[in-house]
């Protein structure tokens, strides 16, 4: 043993001798700082650390411990542990054979385990005290949480970094991980059950924010480690955020953990699908997904109104949950997945930023995969159910989702336009996506459409009939018929009259356009819903037949001129409209038939030939 070793051991012996004398103990502590700076003997340092975090802490009055021990020595202990882990990395990068490296790596890992054991003992002691304040332990939370974070990072990367040496030191690495996990558990007990942060004091609030930020990063690291440790970590993190949510909402950035959890849930769901044959892997992914979903819901619930940049990932997560819920995977997956999706969506519905992102998502739906399109459609159905339930209870939701027009219905038509560009969504799915959308939007309208909303809805449905895309037009036709069916025959007659008026305005060259087909087809469906009374009244909605006869008579007696052909074309257009609409009637009305025959007599071929 050289002189420096001798001097350091003398300090240790002196420290042991004066542990019962607080004044002498306080005076010798500054001399130990040099021990950390210059000492390379791990045995000496580990014994110093044990004395400092154990007997020395317990010998001094608690109000003096933070100033004399925690503040100067915890950062040094953290640095020493970090240097020890770095030394392991340096050894692994060296060209020395594995057989020669293993003993030294094992020794360094044992040093780390020894330090963590002392930290665990310190936390157990602090938790056992009847009263302990943040002021008395101000330097404990952040330093120890950073130590735990660095060790978990080392464990996370161990298989990649250690390579061939991993098997040789596997048991030591496992000891390191488990000891760090124990420190983590005791730290959460201290933070959640013992310490009470005074949120009127800025330094304590900032300390809490710093600790939560590191814990958030730690959760990302632990996803690749033990599932049980991950569960304990997120439980502790959520509890800490909930304890001080009232004070932290405007300051704590929960976007990062929320974004991470949302992305990781998507990845875990993919793991379940692609590894469903491996029950063990699928079950682990399911457990992690269920846990992270609960954490996500808790964070969104307690920081509602303070979410800023996480809505897009939350929506991606919800789409993925809705998409995977219908797939045949491990038993119970669908139930557990949907059990989390519903409350998460309920939490987000009152958020204006979520509404904005939700509607924007549909604009680019045609660029998404077929599975994503299906997921968005299914999520839309879940949303409609939620809105039906919330309509009569929540004025905020009503104001947001139902005004100033009918944005939810407009969004459904946006889905139909986007997803029918290649026609695949509504043609190849085993589940009838189209029917599900139709049923849910019809139920939504029946439950929530007011008299003030109906004119806007009517204009929207007619506008969708007057465009060339098949699926939106067919959906509009179906929806018109469902609304008429749930309404009354008078409403059905009004809608039929509206479509009849539209057909009357068409030009002859428009009759082969798809819009003409959509409107005439919709009219024929509405006529079949009319009561016998209104069916008899419908012919009065047709273009006036007497005026046609008068105009034809005028045409036949007029002299031949340039305008003759124009007059004839106009008459024929009007007559064909009447004829086509009459053909739509389920039971041809005798009066209408007689009137049409009378008109036809005036435009028979001999008269027409004579005129020309």
Image (cartoon, rainbow, N blue to C red):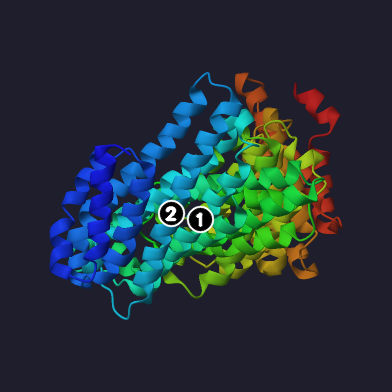
Q: Is residue 528 above or below residue 375?
A: below
Disc 2 element: helix
Please tell me which residue lies in front, 300 or 474: 300
Quick one: label 2, few (<14), some, or many (20+) residues within 10 Å? many
Q: Is residue 205 above or below residue 395?
A: above
Look at the image and tell me whether residue 247 can be seen.
Answer: no
Disc 1 element: helix
Q: Is residue 65 left or right of residue 486?
A: left
Asked if the residues shown at circle 2 and circle 1 are in contact, with their CB atoms under 8 angstroms apart, the answer is yes
The residue that mark 2 highlights is 116
Q: Is residue 41 left or right of residue 13?
A: right
Give the alpha-carbon distance from disc 2 to disc 1, as whole Å: 6 Å
Closer to the chain start, of discs 2 and 1, is 2
The residue that mark 1 highlights is 179
Q: Is residue 128 above or below residue 541?
A: below
Residue at image point 81% right, 23% down: 609
Residue at image point 27% right, 62% down: 16
Q: Position of residue 527 (x, y in %)?
A: 77, 57
Q: Position of residue 234 (x, y in %)?
A: 50, 59
Quick one: label 1, few (<14), some, or many (20+) residues within 10 Å? many
Q: Position of residue 602 (x, y in %)?
A: 79, 38
Which quadrant of the structure image shows residue 230? bottom right
Which quarter of the rendering shows the C terminus?
top right
Q: Position of residue 504 (x, y in %)?
A: 65, 43
Look at the image and tell me whether residue 248 can be seen.
Answer: yes
Which quadrant of the structure image shows residue 205? bottom left
């Amino acid at each position: 043993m050289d002189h420096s070793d001798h001097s350091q051991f003398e300090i240790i012996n002196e420290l042991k001798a004066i542990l019962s004398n607080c004044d002498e103990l306080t005076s010798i502590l500054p001399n130990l700082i040099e021990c950390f700076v210059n000492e390379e003997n791990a045995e000496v340092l580990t014994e110093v650390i044990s004395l400092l975090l154990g007997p020395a802490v317990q010998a001094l009055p608690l109000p003096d411990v933070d100033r004399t021990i925690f503040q100067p020595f915890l950062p040094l202990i953290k640095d020493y542990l970090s240097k020890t882990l770095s030394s392991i990395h340096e050894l692994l990068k060296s060209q020395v054979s594995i057989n020669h490296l293993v003993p030294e790596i094992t020794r360094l890992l044992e040093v780390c385990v020894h330090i963590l054991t002392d930290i665990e003992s310190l936390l157990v002691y602090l938790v056992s005290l009847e009263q302990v304040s943040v002021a008395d332990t101000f330097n404990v939370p952040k330093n120890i949480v950073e130590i735990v974070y660095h060790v978990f990072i080392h464990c996370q990367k161990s298989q990649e970094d250690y390579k061939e040496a991993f098997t040789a030191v596997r048991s030591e690495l496992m000891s390191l991980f488990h000891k760090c996990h124990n420190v983590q558990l005791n730290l959460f007990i201290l933070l959640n059950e013992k310490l009470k942060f005074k949120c009127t004091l800025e330094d304590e609030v900032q300390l809490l924010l710093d600790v939560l930020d590191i814990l958030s990063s730690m959760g990302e690291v632990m996803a690749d480690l033990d599932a049980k440790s991950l569960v304990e970590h997120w439980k502790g993190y959520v509890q800490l955020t909930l304890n001080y949510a009232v004070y932290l909402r405007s300051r704590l950035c929960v976007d990062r953990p929320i974004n991470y959890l949302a992305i990781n849930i998507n990845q875990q769901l993919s793991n379940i699908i692609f590894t469903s044959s491996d029950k063990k892997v699928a079950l682990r992914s399911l457990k992690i997904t269920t846990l992270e979903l609960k954490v996500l819901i808790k964070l969104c619930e307690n920081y509602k109104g303070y979410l800023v940049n996480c809505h897009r990932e939350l929506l991606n997560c919800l789409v993925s949950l809705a998409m995977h819920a219908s797939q045949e995977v491990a038993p119970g997956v669908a139930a557990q997945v949907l059990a989390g999706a519903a409350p998460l969506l309920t939490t987000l519905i009152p958020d204006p930023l979520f509404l904005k992102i939700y509607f924007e998502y549909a604009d680019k739906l045609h660029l998404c995969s077929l599975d994503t399109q299906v997921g968005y459609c299914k999520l839309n159905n879940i949303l409609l159910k939620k809105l039906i339930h919330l309509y009569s209870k929540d004025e905020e939701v009503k104001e947001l989702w139902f005004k100033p027009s009918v944005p939810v219905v407009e969004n459904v038509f946006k889905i139909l336009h986007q997803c029918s560009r290649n026609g695949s969504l509504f043609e190849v799915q085993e589940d009838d996506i189209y029917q599900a959308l139709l049923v849910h939007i019809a139920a939504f309208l029946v439950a929530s459409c007011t008299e003030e909303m109906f004119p806007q809805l009517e204009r929207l449905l007619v506008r969708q009939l007057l465009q060339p895309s098949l699926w939106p037009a067919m959906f509009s036709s179906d929806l018109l018929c469902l609304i008429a069916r749930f309404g009354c025959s008078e409403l059905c007659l009004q809608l039929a009259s509206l479509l009849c008026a539209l057909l009357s305005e068409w030009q002859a060259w428009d009759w082969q356009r798809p819009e003409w087909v959509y409107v005439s087809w919709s009219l024929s469906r509405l006529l079949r819903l009319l009561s016998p009374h209104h069916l008899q009244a419908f012919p009065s909605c047709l273009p006036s037949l007497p005026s046609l006869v008068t105009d034809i008579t005028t045409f036949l007696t007029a002299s031949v001129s340039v305008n003759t052909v124009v007059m004839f074309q106009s008459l024929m257009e009007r007559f064909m409209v009447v004829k086509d609409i009459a053909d739509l009637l389920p039971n041809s009305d005798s009066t209408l038939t007689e009137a049409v025959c009378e008109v036809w007599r005036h435009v028979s071929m001999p008269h027409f030939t004579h005129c020309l």
